[in-house]
Amino acid sequence: MRERRLTQLLNSAESILQRLESLLPPGPCEPAWDSAIAFRWRGSNQPECLRTIRCPHALRLADIRCVDFQKREIDRNTRQFIEGLPANNVLLWGSRGTGKSSLIKALLNEYGGQGLRLIEVDKHQLIELPDMLELLHSRPEKFILFCDDLSFEANEPSYKTLKAALDGSLTALSSNALIYASSNRRHLLPEFNDDNQQTRLYDGEIHHGEAVEEKISLSERFGLWLSFYPFSQEQYLDIVRYWLEKLEAPLNDWETVRAEALRFALKRGSRSGRVAWQFARDWCGRIRLAGMD
């Protein structure tokens, strides 16, 4: 009788455990490393911490115009990284729409066949950098952790995590991972007039106040800075023409196209590469639609 009662209790306990297991979230699964070259970090507490990006941008380095110096520098740094040579984390900063994030996306298409992989990381997820690095540590591929449009408020916790990961933490970046970030801010943090009022002059030397020093200390931990500036009118038109040719739009009346392109930029308040691409798509679509009527 006692053994029978014990068996019933064990069966009941097993049934309860099975029901509890069904309520628990599944454990983390191994990313599908061989199915994609681009990934998006979803969070270390998610069953699928890395989600594959099945259709990454098809941009090539040749498609990025009027930033030849920046293109050469980031390409060189990335080739060093792929070859297992010393390479730097990269900060691309400056005017909007000038090709900062496009350059990083184009690198993936250029070198994905040589083992380069791209992981898109949102700003608020940078606090999980140690978890990301642990996941990538033993992989043979080369990973760029890509943070687009990066900027912080002074007290954000992910700011401190990124600062430590770049240089200062006991856990160093592994040899197969680099951080590439794009930003409109050179120092990644808001700058106020009060910060500069703390600057003092000692024996002819300028000494920044603590607020300025703190803001500079993050961006200078990127070993390679690439600056992007607004395009001139001629550079903007060069990019417009390039994309119209790629889209196989007729260019026999260039003066009309030129005037429309400048009018389009004036409405947008910007002569950036992004606006040039948007105009080319708009113009090409309009011409082809008119031909269908």
Image (tube, helix red, strand yellow):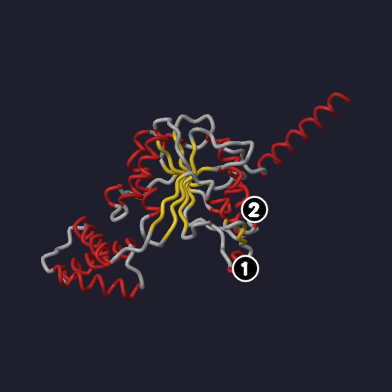
Foreground of the two, 215 or 161: 215
Q: Quadrant of the N terminus?
A: top right
Name above or below for residue 288 compared with residue 214. below
Q: Badge 2 local density, few (<14 within 10 Å), some, or many (20+)?
A: some
Badge 1 is on which residue?
Answer: 194
Are discs 1 and 2 less than 8 Å apart at CB? no
Badge 2 is on which residue?
Answer: 157
Name above or below for residue 98 compared with residue 3. below
Local secondary structure at mark 1: helix
Three-letter residue code for mark 2: Pro
* Residue 272 circle label: none
Q: Residue 30 location in percent, x, y? A: 53, 35
Task: Give the distance between the C-alpha atoms of the residues marked 1 and 2, in whole angstroms.
Answer: 23 Å
Residue placed farthest to the left in the image?
A: 252
The residue at the point 22 percent across, 69 percent down is 286
Q: Quadrant of residue 210?
A: bottom right
Local secondary structure at mark 2: helix
The residue at the point 39 percent across, 54 percent down is 100
The residue at the point 22 percent across, 73 percent down is 260
Foreground of the two, 124 or 72: 72
Q: Residue 225 location in percent, x, y? A: 45, 49
Three-letter residue code for mark 1: Asp
The residue at the point 68 percent across, 39 percent down is 21
Could you tell whether 226 is left or right of 15 in the image? Answer: left
Could you tell whether 250 is left or right of 221 in the image? Answer: left
